[in-house]
Amino acid sequence: MLLAGCVNESASYTIDSNDHALTVVVTQNYFWSKQAGLRVIASRLPDCQRQFDLGKTPLADLNVELFSTGDDTFLLRAGDAMWQLETRTCSQLPEPSDNVQAQPIGVFHMDAKKKLVFEPAEGSVAATR
């Protein structure tokens, strides 16, 4: 019964097919914790699938922004933290430089029912699918 208030949610952004996606996973181990674990799974099947632990993030007002930096390379941002992944080999890249060109794709956030959802950015490729 104590686990009833914990968060264990995931949402995906499908890139060009169900076999090519980024999935964000948010887990809260204890219902009283104000922090949640943040992971992302990069997959481009059958070539690769890998999970990356991105650390802890505040659960209140959780927003993980997703950007494309070109050539199957993506940038995720939560607050001041940024991570760059590429899905050709499912690898984490070094943090991008300050002048990286990135196009917004959307945002992962908790909805009113405490479910993690992906919401496409207006005018993005994701919004037209």
Image (tube, rainbow, N blue to C red):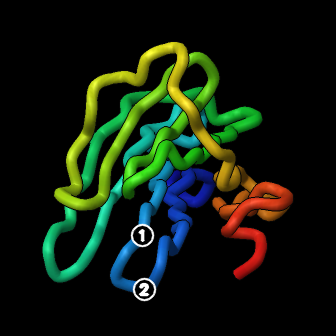
- Report which quarter residue 88 is drawn in: bottom left
Q: Are marks 1 and 2 in contact (CB under 8 Å)?
A: yes
Label placed on residue 30? none
Give percent across and percent down for residue 96.
41, 23
Instruction: Estimate how packed mark 2 is, as few (under 14), some (14 to 19) or many (20 or more) residues with alpha carbons within 10 Å.
Output: few
How far apart are the two marked residues, 1 and 2, measured between alpha carbons?
A: 7 Å
| Type of the residue with mark 2 | Asn
- Residue 81: % across, % down: 51, 21
| Numbered circles on residues, count | 2
- Label 1: how many Cα within 10 Å (few below 14, some 14–19, many 20+): some
Which residue corresponds to the image point at 72% horizontal and 53% vertical from the top-left?
110
Q: Which residue matches tag 1?
A: 21
In the rendered image of this protein, does residue 64 appear above or below residue 101? Answer: below
98 left or right of 46 in image:
right
Residue 61, image x and y in percent? Answer: 76, 35
- Which corner quadrant of the image does residue 22 belong to? bottom left
| Residue situated in front as seen by the camera: 60 or 85 | 85
As drawn, 30 above or below 71: above
